[in-house]
Image: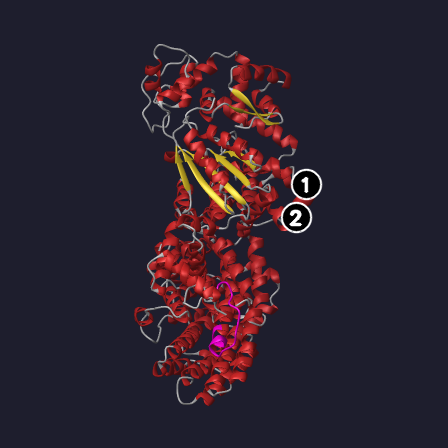
């Protein structure tokens, strides 16, 4: 019976009637038994009647180590039933990932290497694609119940779906008890990606509604007061129970409810009680064969006892074949705990035996082994270890849980297997983002390393040094490395060099270039195998440009790249923690675009194979910046998004800052102010923002984009905060390109003396071994001279810069120089040549996908009198693309809330952008804005 929730159901009906593209998330929250599940059922019926596909899933209280449990419950049956054509449309990549989490697709997996932990964000993308595939023409309702019992992998997946949603119209219903919500999921629901949510809090039923749940009874009011208006407790009372005390509003379960539920259970026959306990062991979705195995009964006896459970309304059918579920999760909890721990362990063991005989996946068997294995059972330890390795790619938290049980079950943790299990646990903790626990394990390994096995201590020191950075405590790692180097015991040169190189890496990441160069030089003084020499040379190539030693840096880079290309893949794999640095330095510091993308692709494939999520994020971010320099803007933007997905999953703040800065660099190329500002906000919220050397530079990138778009930007103040015009701590490459941007901005603002100063600074950093640096300085000087009485000289410089940038493989920069040539032709009075030259620049910008640059070029052509059709995002008022988009929707009569829904942003974001629009346009009303945009649309 559905009573007392008509208002909440009407709210959800309204959302169904106006469901926009993308997700509409709705939280449904309340205490146990308040009616969340029933409301989900009712809106599901209404949605199905409107032609929407409805998928429902429930998290299980005792299955919190089952990866993606609630999504598995909701999607697996439907994915298995997908037609061949619809499944194939997902593509082999998505199918391979989906099969790791959804057994229903296991028989459709194309051949290929198994996915690795480094790529698990790709599973999240695959699920988004699967939701699109499962959606009906009218859209999709995904109802996830009891999320307070969801595992961490579910929280990660939800975060992704909110940040990068499927394209279909999606009503995402999230039901939970707020006081029991796990921290990770609570953080997701409080995050900016969830800003457009709706929240329905279910209060106690009113007395008029509650009377419908009670039998004719002279003391109905007293029973209502005792139950506190909770529907579940009212139903218990209706069955003849009695609560010891009134239910306190907001309490999880009032005193006496569990006893009343157990009272229902106690009235059953012994066989029915046994089967009920076995069903509680198996899970909310009951499998008759598994129940029989767990109970130790035959299938006919189990079916007979189940009939009694159905008659007593403890079990109910779900409409999905033979699967049934408990009437309520609280009932399952009461039944589960009515059995003794020893009986439960034995029942889990019997269930594991049946699943093993069926050939079930190890990740399906492992939850039962984890609850039944005895200490000293090597087979159980091995199974849990294998299952953890499989789960690591998709659910590191689950891998951690199983490895802890395996380590507990191994009676000699100090032996070789015990140490291996500890290191695997440390790795899983690192991927989970639990760096303090990872650190504790590694320090324990360091403190207990056997005296006669120095290589174990060496390995522990190196891992501790890496983990210290993840904990935002890099100096602690450097201290450990220095102490180990000072120890007086025999050590191979390769081991000593590894310590020096870790020290160099720690220094260079903190912009301590002198110390980094000294450590790398100390490593080079040793007898090194080629992979380590390659790494040491790359460290030199990274550090020396910042010390004014560019020719030596270029020579070191040349030798490092030659060594890198000569090494065989196994040698790379053996030193993957370092070898990825060579192509990164080549790309980030030296801007060599030729073979860099090939080398970065090689490193990415190796990092994926070994599950190195950290390196994967760095490589993806660096690849995005290289693609932007190479003029492949759409690929660069997509790669930057992928890098951010990978970096966020690691929980490593310094890595996330690196990737956000790479994303902002791509946005600078695209002149995408929204993306830069979003990156800045995300970095500012991180704890490492106060010391990370790259964090302050995001404000400079933001101001450069604002200034290039003609907006106010406090560049002078920002530069002063960074240490002045010399930009100390900024990479040589970044300084040269920043001086180019500043010269351009000063010239556009008609400040020729300032532009000339920035050009001189760029010229002081040029090196013939770095052709792009000469091109950048030449273009900077051309911008400066374009505002002087020497336009012909500026034109020659701009032509030289365009050629040099094109030769070096920087098409966007080359087109910028070509655009300046067009402007200078106009200054010299040759309008036809100016327009023709600008056409060439516009064509390159268009080929590169540099939309804002194309729009700027068209604006210059309009100023010369050419009638050029306006693009939808081309605003003559200095609005950003997002501001233009919001202004257009407001002018069409949409409210702020409607705009927020259409664009999948928060109302606060719409308000902020709209206030900027009014400020820039000098308007104060929506009517005036509509009139202005109407005039613009009527212009040629």
In magenta segment, residue 735? no
Q: Is residue 333 above or below residue 491?
A: above
From where the camera sits, is residue 378 visible?
A: no
193 or 573: nearer the viewer: 193
Residue 303's quadrant in the figure?
A: top right
Look at the magenta stretch and give its main secondary structure: loop
Label 1: element kind: loop
Binning the other alpha carbons within 10 Å of mark 1 as few (below 14), some (14 to 19) or many (20 upward) gives: few
Q: Secondary structure at mark 2?
A: helix
Vertical placement of residue 209 versus 479, above or below: above
Q: Is residue 360 left or right of residue 503?
A: right
Label count reads 2
Label 1, label 2: how many angstroms apart (C-alpha)?
A: 10 Å
Q: Which residue is mark 1?
A: 83
Query: Could you classify mark 2 by the number of other residues whose Cα lies within 10 Å: few (under 14), some (14-19), or many (20 or more)?
Result: some
Residue 625: % across, % down: 50, 66
Residue 126 shows up from this direction:
yes
Above or below, 294 relative to 142: above
* 365 in relation to 728, above or below: above
**Mark 1 or 2, nearer chain start:** 1
* Residue 634 percent coordinates (x, y): 55, 63
Q: Nearer the viewer, residue 624 or 349?
A: 624
Percent from the top left, x then y, of residue 339? 47, 20
Residue 383 at x, y percent in the picture: 57, 37
Badge 2 is on which residue? 89
* Left or right of residue 640, residue 484 in this image: left
User: What is the span of residues highlighted in magenta in the rendered image?
Assistant: 859-873
The residue furthest top is: 218
Query: Could you tell me if the residues under marks 1 and 2 are in contact, i.e. CB atoms within 8 Å?
Result: no
Q: Nearer the viewer, residue 441 or 371?
A: 371
Residue 412: mark in rendering = none
Q: Residue at x 52, y 19 (%)?
A: 276
């Amino acid at each position: 019976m559905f009573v007392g929730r008509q208002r909440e159901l009407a709210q959800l009906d309204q959302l169904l009637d106006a469901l926009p593209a993308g997700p509409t998330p709705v939280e449904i929250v309340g205490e146990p038994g308040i009616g969340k599940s029933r409301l989900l059922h009712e809106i599901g019926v209404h949605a199905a009647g409107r032609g929407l596909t409805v998928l429902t899933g429930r998290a299980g209280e005792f299955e919190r180590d089952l990866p993606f449990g609630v999504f598995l419950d909701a999607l697996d049956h439907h994915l298995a039933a997908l037609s061949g054509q619809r499944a194939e449309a997902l593509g082999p990549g998505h199918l391979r990932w989906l099969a790791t989490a959804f057994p229903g697709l296991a028989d459709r997996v194309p051949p290929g290497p198994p996915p690795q932990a480094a790529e698990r964000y790709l599973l999240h993308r695959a699920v988004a694609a699967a939701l699109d595939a499962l959606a009906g023409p009218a859209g999709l309702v995904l109802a996830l119940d009891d999320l307070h019992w969801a595992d961490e992998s579910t929280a990660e997946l939800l975060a992704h779906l909110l940040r990068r949603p499927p394209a279909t119209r999606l009503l995402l219903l999230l039901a939970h008890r707020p006081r029991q919500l796990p921290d990770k999921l609570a953080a997701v629901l409080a995050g900016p990606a969830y800003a457009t949510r709706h929240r329905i809090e279910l209060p106690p039923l009113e007395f008029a509604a509650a009377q419908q749940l009670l039998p004719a009874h002279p003391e109905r009011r007293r029973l209502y007061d005792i139950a506190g208006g909770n529907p579940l407790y009212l139903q218990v009372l209706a069955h003849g129970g009695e609560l010891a005390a009134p239910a306190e509003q907001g309490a999880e379960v009032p005193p006496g409810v569990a006893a009343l539920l157990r009272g229902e259970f106690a009235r059953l026959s012994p066989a029915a009680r046994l089967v009920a306990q076995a069903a509680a062991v198996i899970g909310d979705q009951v499998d008759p064969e598994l129940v029989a195995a767990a109970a130790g009964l035959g299938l006919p006896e189990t079916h007979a006892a189940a009939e009694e459970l159905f008659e007593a309304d403890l079990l109910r059918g779900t409409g999905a074949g033979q699967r049934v579920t408990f009437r309520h999760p609280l009932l399952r909890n009461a039944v589960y705990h009515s059995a003794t721990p020893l009986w439960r362990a034995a029942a889990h063991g019997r269930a594991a035996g049946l699943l093993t005989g069926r050939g079930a996946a190890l990740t399906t068997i492992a939850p039962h082994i984890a609850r039944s294995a005895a200490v000293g059972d090597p087979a159980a330890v091995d199974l849990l270890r294998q299952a953890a390795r499989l789960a690591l790619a998709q659910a590191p938290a689950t891998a951690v849980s199983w490895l802890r049980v395996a380590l507990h079950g191994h009676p000699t943790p100090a032996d070789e297997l015990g140490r291996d299990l500890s290191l695997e646990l440390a790795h899983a903790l690192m991927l989970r983002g639990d760096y303090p626990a990872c650190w504790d394990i590694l320090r324990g390994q360091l403190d207990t390393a056997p005296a006669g096995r120095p290589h174990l201590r060496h390995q522990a020191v190196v891992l501790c040094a890496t983990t210290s950075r993840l904990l935002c405590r890099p100096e602690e790692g450097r201290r450990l490395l220095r102490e180990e180097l000072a120890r007086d015991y025999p050590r191979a040169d390769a081991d000593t060099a590894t310590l020096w190189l870790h020290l160099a890496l720690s220094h260079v990441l903190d912009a301590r270039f002198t110390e980094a160069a000294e450590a790398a030089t100390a490593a080079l003084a040793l007898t090194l195998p080629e992979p380590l020499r390659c790494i040491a040379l790359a460290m030199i190539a990274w550090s020396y440009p910042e010390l004014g030693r560019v020719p030596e840096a270029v020579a070191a880079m040349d030798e490092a790249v030659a060594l890198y290309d000569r090494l065989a893949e196994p040698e790379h794999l053996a030193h993957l923690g370092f070898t990825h640095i060579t192509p990164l330095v080549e790309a980030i510091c030296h801007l060599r675009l030729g073979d860099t993308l090939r080398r970065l692709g090689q490193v990415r494939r190796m990092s994926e194979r070994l599950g190195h999520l950290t390196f994967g994020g760095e490589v993806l971010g660096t690849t995005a910046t290289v693609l932007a320099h190479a003029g492949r803007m759409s690929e660069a933007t997509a790669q930057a998004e992928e890098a951010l997905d990978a970096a966020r999953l690691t929980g490593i703040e310094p890595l996330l800052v690196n990737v956000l800065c790479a994303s902002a660099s791509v946005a600078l190329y695209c002149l995408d102010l929204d993306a830069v500002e979003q990156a800045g906000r995300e970095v500012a919220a991180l704890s490492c923002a106060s010391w990370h050397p790259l964090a302050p530079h995001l404000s400079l990138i933001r101001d450069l984009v604002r200034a290039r778009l003609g907006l106010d930007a406090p560049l002078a103040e920002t530069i002063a905060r960074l240490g002045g015009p010399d930009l100390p701590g900024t990479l040589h490459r970044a300084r040269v390109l920043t001086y180019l941007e500043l010269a351009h901005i000063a010239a556009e603002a008609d400040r020729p003396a300032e532009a000339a100063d920035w050009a001189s600074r760029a010229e002081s950093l040029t090196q013939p071994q770095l052709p792009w640096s000469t091109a950048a300085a030449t273009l900077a000087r051309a911008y400066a001279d374009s505002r002087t009485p020497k336009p012909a000289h500026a034109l020659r410089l701009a032509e030289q810069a365009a050629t040099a940038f094109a030769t070096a493989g920087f098409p966007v920069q080359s087109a910028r120089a070509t655009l300046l040539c067009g402007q200078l032709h106009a200054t010299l009075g040759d309008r036809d040549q100016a327009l023709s030259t600008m056409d060439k620049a516009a064509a390159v910008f268009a080929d590169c996908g540099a939309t804002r640059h194309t729009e700027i070029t068209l604006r210059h052509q309009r100023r010369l009198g050419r009638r050029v059709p306006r693009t939808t995002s081309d605003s003559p008022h200095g609005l950003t693309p997002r501001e233009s988009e919001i202004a257009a929707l407001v002018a069409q009569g949409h409210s702020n809330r409607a705009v927020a829904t259409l664009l999948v942003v928060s109302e606060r974001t719409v308000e902020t952008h709209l206030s900027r629009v009014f400020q820039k346009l000098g308007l104060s009303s929506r009517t005036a804005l509509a009139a202005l945009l109407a005039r613009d649309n009527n212009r040629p």
